Amino acid sequence: MNNMDKRIFYIWLAECSEAQSDRKLFLMSLFGDAEGVYNASPSDLRDAFAAHPQELPEQFLLEALLRKDLRPAERSLRQAEACGAEAICLEDSLYPPHLAEISDPPPVIYALGNTDLLKEQGIGVVGTRRASPYGRWVAEEIGHKIAECGVTVISGMAAGIDAMAHTGCLRAGGDTIAVFGTGVDICFPKSNLKLYREILDKGLAVSEVRPGYGGFAFHFPLRNRIISALSKSVVIVEGAPKSGSMITASRAMEQNRDVFAVPGNINQPNSLGTNMLIADGAYPILRLDILPETLRIGRNAKALLRKMSDAEKAVYEIIESSPGCSADEISLLTERSAAETAALLSAMEIKGLIRSEGSFKFIK
């Protein structure tokens, strides 16, 4: 059966009930994959639930599995295709390995935009919807500075802190992923419509909720585990002790991600959560000018290329693809004079973009 057909079974399993994803992962471990779960006989399914009551406690999940109705999954796949979204199942090579490794990965995710951004972990930046002016400013600056390092900013596109983190990233020309609690084709909140369109144009929207579906309130806390899983570290800017931000921090710690928090005014209710995180061992963000060092991220080639002139980019790409090339070779390939090439190489070396070993040039 081809890959397109295989996705139907993962979508079917994801939509069978609102049971947690770890239950569905356990079923796949018993029967091989989502198709194996679908093809399991009613008696085998009942036996599995009877033998594993702790791992499979929900009888409503069993009832949904026994119906074996693929029609809703087929509709979801058609809806994804209609809006241009990719349906990426657990066995797909596009499925992020760092998401697959958590205890409760979604059987399928929908992605609308630049799916290349799923290949590498970014930095999550989240916080309260009721952000203070200080929190909004900090979130935008953090998003901007992470993007300047060529690292993807991941958040939830909620009003407040999330929206400002995305905004700062996009202002720096960076890459950003928004993880939704609705279908990826639904802008929520509607006040973020301009931001939503910019994210789809330049970044990526991801959700485990099928396209066209507005989602329920419980989908929003659930999406926080995806934000943290896609991130190598998570920054909490502002949040009350019992909030979605603290759920994200908790899931990040469960997933062995580093958690950072922005200290706040002790008279500000939404600073209490972040201050408590720091008291409990989260890394504090104390200075924005050393944020890359604090988050342990360095400028990568993607970030450097954004700040180079067209002439520098051309030279950088030549040296990157042919390390050890000479100035004469670069001059020939760029059709510049020897004097122009020498001046350009000197400038790039001063900026720390390249290094010389004798007459040979290398990326620094």
Image (cartoon, rainbow, N blue to C red):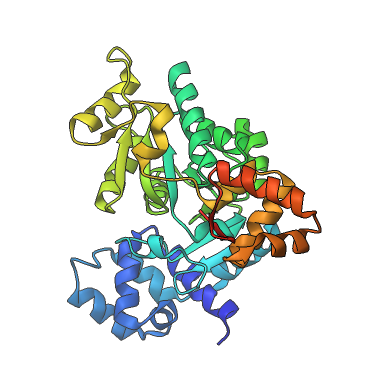
Relative to 195, 94 lies left or right: left
Relative to 101, 288 lies left or right: right
Question: Measuring 29% from the left and 66% from the top, which residue is drawn there?
Answer: 59
Question: Measuring 58% from the left and 43% from the top, which residue is drawn there?
Answer: 174
Q: Residue furthest top?
A: 267
Task: Give the x, y percent position of residue 167.
Answer: 58, 33
Relative to 70, 255 lies left or right: left
Question: Measuring 54% from the left and 37% from the top, which residue is drawn there?
Answer: 166
Task: Give the x, y percent position of residue 76.
Answer: 59, 63
| Quadrant housing the N terminus | bottom right
Q: Is residue 226 above or below residue 131?
A: below
Q: Nearer the viewer, residue 242 or 326?
A: 326
Relative to 129, 42 lies left or right: left
Q: Is residue 166 above or below residue 4?
A: above
Question: Measuring 63% from the left and 42% from the top, which residue is drawn there?
Answer: 347
**Residue 314 visible in the shown view:** yes
Q: Is residue 269 above or below residue 45?
A: above
**Residue 162 visible in the shown view:** no
Q: Nearer the viewer, residue 340 or 199?
A: 340
Q: Is residue 277 above or below residue 359?
A: above
Task: Give the x, y percent position of residue 304.
Answer: 58, 46
Q: Nearer the viewer, residue 298 or 85?
A: 298
Asked which quadrant contains residue 258, the reply is top left
